[in-house]
Amino acid sequence: MALVILFLVRKIIPTKGVRQITTAQLKTELKSRDKQFVDVRTPMEFKGNHIKQFKNIPLNALKAEAKNLSKEKEVIVICQSGMRSNAAVKQLKKLGFSNVTNVKGGMNAWS
């Protein structure tokens, strides 16, 4: 039981060195050309509703597709609720991306 709780807590707690922004803050970030926007939801979720500046790279393909992202530019990641994007920013940090941002609440919080 303790391992399950530890596992869940580690999934929810924001990653150290990762900026966390709200969807309200995201709206001002969308104007920047110096940032990369990645939506890690499935292609079906993305097709149903997405923010036009975001490129769809499903979480399960992120490791392979990360080579197409610039490590020089900030990467802002979104998903449906913030859980997969939190996992994605952890993965990007491990791959050497230093400037990564997670959108808290994901598309559920977008209006």
Image (cartoon, rainbow, N blue to C red):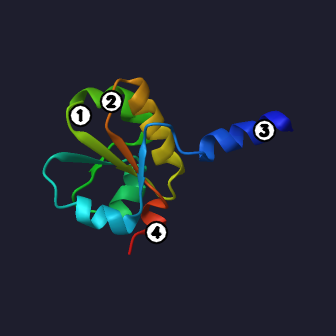
Residue 69 vs residue 102, the one in the foreground: 102
Residue for badge 3: 4
Q: Is residue 110 left or right of residue 51?
A: right
Circle number at residue 109: 4
Query: Disc 4 marks which amino acid?
Result: Ala
Q: Earlier in the sequence, mark 3 or mark 1?
A: 3
Q: Amino acid at mark 2?
A: Phe
Residue 69 as seen in the image, left or right of residue 34: right
Residue 100 position, x and y percent, is 35, 40
**Element carrying mark 4:** helix
Q: Secondary structure at mark 2?
A: loop
Density class for disc 3 (Cα within 10 Å; few <14, some 14-19, many ≥20) is few
Circle 1 — which element? Answer: loop
Front position in the image: 33 or 44: 33
Please state which of the two labelled residues, at mark 3 or mark 2, is closer to the viewer. Answer: 2
Going from N to C along the chain, the mark reached first, 2 or 4, is: 2
Mark pair 1, 2: CA separation: 9 Å
Residue indicated by mark 2:
97
Q: CA distance from mark 2 to mark 4?
A: 25 Å
Task: Work out which quarter of the rendered image holds the C terminus and state it.
Answer: bottom left
Q: Is residue 99 left or right of residue 58?
A: left
User: Dots 1 and 2: beta carbons under 8 Å?
Assistant: yes
Q: Quadrant of the N terminus?
A: top right
Tag 3's secondary structure? helix
Mark 2 packing: few (<14 Cα in 10 Å), some, or many (20+)?
Answer: some
Q: Which mark is residue 69?
A: 1
